[in-house]
Amino acid sequence: MNIDMIRAAADRAKGHVRRTPLLNSPFLDEIAGRRVWVKPECLQHTGSFKFRGAWSALSALPSAQRAKGVIAYSSGNHAQGVALAAKMHGAPAVIVMPEDSPRLKIANTRAYGAEVVLYDRANESREEIGAALAEERGLTLIKPYDEPQVIAGQGTTGLEIAQQAAEAGIEEAQVIVCCGGGGLTSGIALALEGEAPGFRVRPAEPEGFDDAARSLVSGQIERNASALGSICDAIVTPAPGELTFPIMQRLVGPGLVVRDDEALQAMGHAFNRLKLVAEPGGAVALAAALFRGGEIDGDDVIVTISGGNVDADMFARALQTLG
Amino acid sequence: MNIDMIRAAADRAKGHVRRTPLLNSPFLDEIAGRRVWVKPECLQHTGSFKFRGAWSALSALPSAQRAKGVIAYSSGNHAQGVALAAKMHGAPAVIVMPEDSPRLKIANTRAYGAEVVLYDRANESREEIGAALAEERGLTLIKPYDEPQVIAGQGTTGLEIAQQAAEAGIEEAQVIVCCGGGGLTSGIALALEGEAPGFRVRPAEPEGFDDAARSLVSGQIERNASALGSICDAIVTPAPGELTFPIMQRLVGPGLVVRDDEALQAMGHAFNRLKLVAEPGGAVALAAALFRGGEIDGDDVIVTISGGNVDADMFARALQTLG
């Protein structure tokens, strides 16, 4: 896993993955007490950075293997990313989702061209169902973060940040990244290590689901007590990955932790000042920049908005914080 | 007024005006029955395309004249554009606003560094107040659309559309533009005349305020019965401009007209599928693409989202259309 893989992923992505802009607002700067730069991956295809990793993984497969199809387990952004990346490659995609997933997510994943296979979370194992399907049809499993080509794809975000920050004259900055399994965090860190050595990556997580922050402190992979119960569900995973954590340990930290109400407030500010729709998990890095300034150094902070797949009810809650 | 002025405005804008992306979504394509491409000027500085024209006008002034300052009459997006463009040039700006303007708009305009002069709409004339201030301080008036350098600045949107559409392989398209006084519409039309002759600009307006559409039919400048009463207030003006209308008459039309409820629905789709915040007036072009397909030709339609300065209450109404 190195920056050459990220550069190769960026080459394969040209013309297919969106180059998202780097945005700012004097109003956000005022709240944060420093310049705040926002990388809005909510504007990526399928509404999250996950499309980058999915495109990278699909485009790296030998064409005969890709033609047989891919499979992923996910009820969220990774599923949509894999579904659309497969469709754009003309490859079949099977997404294994819990049968109690929100109907809108199932419909969206199908609309991106995937076959959705539902399972009963209480009585069935998605791994067994997936393994049987993969065996039967010769499908390739695309893991959500512990997969080198997925990390390389997420890392293309970092290459763009390095270039856009240089254009804005930023030589030193902390880069706060919304962190789940660590694919985006470790990918950006690897890219910036090579391209912008004055930058330091800081993972951001919701309170109570700060496995990355705790793992970085203890030096070993720590798990969350539960994977359920946060409004920031898009970035909640059981623990950092086996591949992502060593990269994070070498290059990243310390972690930043924000409350759910701060994530909602950050969504309100993104609406008001950037005209962007952020999902709660996608807003934790901005929330850290706005409300955890005492834990951040320097004149410039760069944050990811990792996704914008939020329903109207939750977004209405964020709007209410603007009162 | 010609494309060379637009190209010169684009040169002056480099590094200061945002190059907004060109976005799409398979879900919007499905509703429209053709490919829909969105130019989101809500992501521009100050949340609307008006910053382009303001930057162009400020940057075109001789530096000694600029240093004395500029003045604008506006309670909306033009005011914010002029205020920030002046601040970034280190020039004073005076904005004359009705004293019953929403406090948030007054506060935002001040936050961008402008001096706000309030007047009583019933008993005072903004022109008299402005003329007195301009005379006293040597300020230059920046008109919102009937001003060549403002039209040139708005036209830079068209240069970007031409380039981005070419990259996407689009050779023929109708380009629907949210239309108020016609600065953006005529500027884009001039740019595309030179850069993308297969493109045709169509102005979009709210029902009851379709002065541009009616003027294009009658061949002379027609006025709206009222300038008040539309939720699409950001793009409602009394009539097309003296400079903009001849350009529109030569290059643009026929007009498209949408209802307020369709603009709200389009805002909901922009939220859901593009992760963008559109204001009602900024959503009329997208609404036309989605709901007036029978009046549009071709496989590709390009629409502007001209701004995103909408308050939480109005946005909540748009979210309710998603039901």
Image (cartoon, coloured by chain):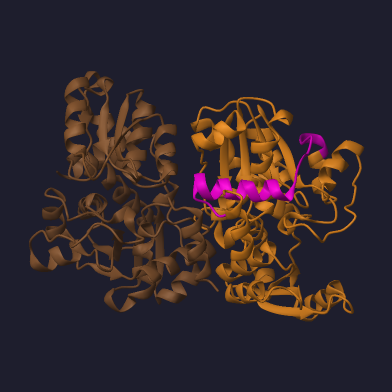
Chain colours: A orange, B brown
Image-quadrant location for residue A194:
top right
State which quarter of the image contains the N terminus of chain A. Answer: top right
Of residue A233 and residue B190, the one placed in the foreground of this image is A233
Of residue B93 and residue A248, the one placed in the foreground of this image is B93
Residue B271 is situated, as x and y percent measured from the top left of the image, at 51, 61
The number of numbered badges drawn on the structure is 0
Residues in magenta, as a range: A249-278
Q: Is residue B293 left or right of residue A256?
A: left
Q: Is residue A278 visible?
A: no
Looking at the image, is A266 positioned above or below residue B206? above
Q: Is residue A146 visible?
A: yes
Residue A59 is situated, as x and y percent measured from the top left of the image, at 62, 60
Magenta span: helix, strand or loop, mainly?
helix
Looking at the image, is A167 positioned above or below residue A15? above
Q: Give the farthest residue toward the front.
A: B123
Residue A149 is situated, as x and y percent measured from the top left of the image, at 70, 54
Q: At x 26% / y 36%, what residue is drawn?
A: B72
Q: Is residue A265 left or right of residue B39?
A: right
- Is B323 part of what is drawn in magenta? no
Residue B137 is situated, as x and y percent measured from the top left of the image, at 22, 21
Of residue A37 and residue B15, the one placed in the foreground of this image is A37
Q: Is residue A300 left or right of residue A139?
A: left
Q: Is residue A20 left or right of residue B213?
A: right
- Is A267 part of what is drawn in magenta? yes
Image-quadrant location for residue B249:
bottom left
